[in-house]
Amino acid sequence: MEFWISKKSLAKASAEGERELREHPELLEKGRMIIENEKLKNPMPHCPLCGTDNIRRISSSAKVGNTLAFGIYGNKRKKQFECLNPNCRYKF
């Protein structure tokens, strides 16, 4: 089942939300506190070099393949995650 929202109704909802936040700024602060609490409950690992959370776990088969191909000089066998940022690609 698909839902389609017109631009007019989306703009109306956005304007109503902005008006409500102007009238009740405590709602914005409450929302920020909820987000911060959720971040503390479920910390996502992030790249220590560039700070992005766009990472993936290096699989066991990738580690084995890298070790078979490069021996003790393979760089993936002791790492757990790889950054997917094309400018970083750091393994940690």
Image (cartoon, rainbow, N blue to C red):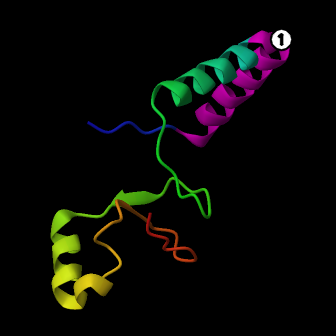
Q: Residue at 62% across / 26% down in the picture?
A: 36
How far from the left and from the top, in percent, is residue 38? 52, 25
The outermost residue toward the front is 72
Q: Is residue 20 magenta?
A: yes
Left or right position of 7 against 61: right
Left or right position of 50 against 24: left
Quarter of the picture containing the N terminus is: top left
How far from the left and from the top, in percent, is residue 49? 60, 64
How far from the left and from the top, in percent, is residue 88? 55, 73
Which of the 4 quarters of the picture holds residue 52?
A: bottom right
Q: Main secondary structure of the magenta part?
A: helix
* Chain part drawn in magenta: 6-26
Q: Residue at 48% across / 58% down in the picture?
A: 54
Q: Residue at 53% across / 58% down in the picture?
A: 47
Q: Is residue 81 above or below residue 73?
A: above
Task: Name the one closer to the observer, 90 or 35.
Answer: 90
Which residue, given by chain and number where applicable, does mark 1 sit on? 23
Which of the 4 quarters of the picture holds residue 60?
A: bottom left
Task: Name the one closer to the observer, 64 or 71.
Answer: 71
- The residue tagged with tag 1: helix, strand or loop? helix
